[in-house]
Each structure stands twice: as structure tokens, then as C-alpha cells.
Amino acid sequence: MTTSEILRNIMPCGCVCYTCSACGDGAISFHSKELLRYLDGMEGFRENHPDYEIIVNTMRTLRFWATQECPGCRVGGLNLCTYENCPVCGCSKQHNVDFCYMCAEYPCEKINSVDKWREANDYMLEHGADAHFEREKRLSHYRNYKKPDDAEN
């Protein structure tokens, strides 16, 4: 992967946007578009099918996922990150680093606030961002997911 591809797919916190449902260039959007292409015309073809409502709802859901446009927090603008007001992207820009593990202050309170962020950056520190992407690109973005304020609950 090129550096620009790595930076487009992995955020400073270590989250892999490629697997996020909001990512316009991600796997979910890509595969939704592929399924829509294969299912094109099915709504009219299956109109009398007993599961027609399920088919219509499935197509509607696929269209939703296929049209997501979040470019990730590095780009700015539309950012659909689950962590509202996430401090990491701004902090990484302020410290002029691509990933938290590259910062002289790593690990800090910000990265330690979410286990997933710390684990991802520790892994990248040891194995590199390419290896992190390869490890994560086929896994659910949402497994073991907790917002910083959920950790206390």
C-alpha cells in the first residue's frame, strides 16, 4: 500500500475506516454497490413474491450503504466518526504525526481513553500500519466497540 492509501484507510487513532459503514471508499459501500448491481431489476421481477417486502427493504438498505460519503477525520468536512468531538485527529495534526504511536508523548491520556485505539497503535508501533490494515480489513469495524464514555458503564 502507498502512504496515501494507508492514511486514507487508517485514522490517527488506529481505527480502520475501510471497514466502517460510513466510509465512501470502504468495503461496506463497495460490496453494497456490487450487490445492487447483481440484484438490479429484482424489485420488479419479484413483485408477486411472498417476500417482496423483505426484498424492497434489502434494496433500500443496500442503497443506503452504497451512498455513504464520509472521507474520514484526516480530510475534515463530513466526519461520521462514532466518537463525537474526538480529540485524536486534531492532536495528531498539532503534533505533526500520522499516527498516535509516532508522537513523542505516546502513550497519552487521549489514546489510553479507548482500549481499541491503544491496542491498534501498539500493534502499528511493533508491526507497522500496513500489517495493521491487513489484519483488520476483513474484520468487523464494530467488534468490541465502546465509546469513551461507555467504558464507565
Image (spheres, rainbow, N blue to C red):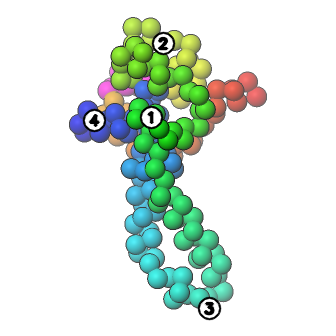
Q: Earlier in the sequence, mark 1 or mark 4?
A: 4
Query: What residue is rendered at 32% in x and 35% in y?
Result: 6
Q: Is residue 40 visible?
A: yes
Q: Earlier in the sequence, mark 4 or mark 2?
A: 4
Instruction: Check if mark 3's residue and mark 1's residue have beta carbons within 8 Å.
Output: no
Q: Nearer the viewer, mark 2 or mark 1?
A: 1
Q: Nearer the viewer, mark 3 or mark 1?
A: 1
Please name the residue that numbered disc 4 is placed on. Answer: 4
The secondary structure type at the circle numbered 2 is loop
Q: Nearer the viewer, mark 3 or mark 4?
A: 4
Q: Quadrant of the N terminus?
A: top left
Please name the residue that numbered disc 3 is placed on. Answer: 48
**Amino acid tagged 4:** Ser
Mark 1 packing: few (<14 Cα in 10 Å), some, or many (20+)? few
Residue 84 position within the rendered picture, expressed as x and y whole percent measured from the top left: 61, 32
Q: Nearer the viewer, mark 1 or mark 4?
A: 1
Please name the residue that numbered disc 1 is placed on. Answer: 76
Residue 126 included in the magenta stretch of the image: yes
Q: Main secondary structure of the magenta part?
A: helix
Q: Earlier in the sequence, mark 3 or mark 4?
A: 4
Task: Tell me if 49 is positioned left or right of 36 in this view.
Answer: right
Residue 124 position within the rendered picture, expressed as x and y whole percent measured from the top left: 37, 25
- In the image, residue 96 sits, relative to residue 28, either above or below, namely above
Query: What residue is rendered at 64% in x and 33% in y?
Result: 146
Q: Which residues are magenta?
A: 121-128
Instruction: Check if mark 3's residue and mark 4's residue have beta carbons within 8 Å.
Output: no
Please name the residue that numbered disc 2 is placed on. Answer: 107
Residue 49 position within the rendered picture, expressed as x and y whole percent measured from the top left: 61, 88
Query: Distance of mark 1 from mark 4, alpha carbons?
Result: 16 Å
